[in-house]
Image (cartoon, rainbow, N blue to C red):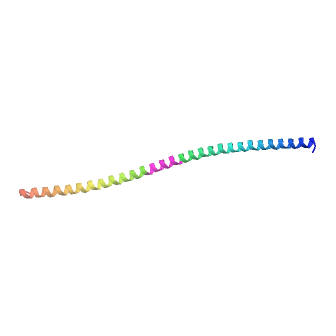
Amino acid sequence: MGIDAIKEIRQTEQQAEEIKKQAMEKAREILRKAEEEGNRFLVEVTQQAQQERQQFMRQAEEEARKEIEALNQKAEEECQKIRQMAQAKLDKAISLIMGKVVNMDGHS
């Protein structure tokens, strides 16, 4: 083997080592970018989930408020009916008592 062949082998080995080094650097850069992109995606997904949770809570609160208003209205209507029935019975009781008082005195 000649000196030129040995020099050529060494040069080829150095080129191979340089190519390997560049490939490793490129691989590290790709991994770094992938990690950054993954972190960015995670932040976006987290923010979106928080926004959806807030929207869901607003909707749930609004639905609960409407249901409470409907129940309050129904309760008020029921109370009004009871008041009317009580007033009617009170009026009837007053008439009965007045009728008995008048009849006891002998006046009609």
Horizontal placement of 69 versus 31: left or right?
A: left
Read off the magenta span. Answer: 52-63
Residue visible at 41% across and 53% down?
67
Q: How many badges with numbers are in the image?
A: 0
Residue 34 visible in the current orientation: yes
Residue 12, position in %: x, y?
86, 43
Residue 108 visible in the current orientation: no
Secondary structure mainly formed by the magenta segment: helix
> Does the magenta-highlighted stretch encompass residue 61?
yes
Residue visible at 69% across and 44% down?
31
Residue 7, position in %: x, y?
89, 41
- Residue furthest to the left in view is 106
Residue visible at 55% across and 48% down?
49
Screen quadrant of the N terminus: top right
> Does the magenta-highlighted stretch encompass residue 31?
no
Question: Residue 35 or 43: which is nearer the viewer?
Answer: 35
- Residue furthest to the front in view is 1
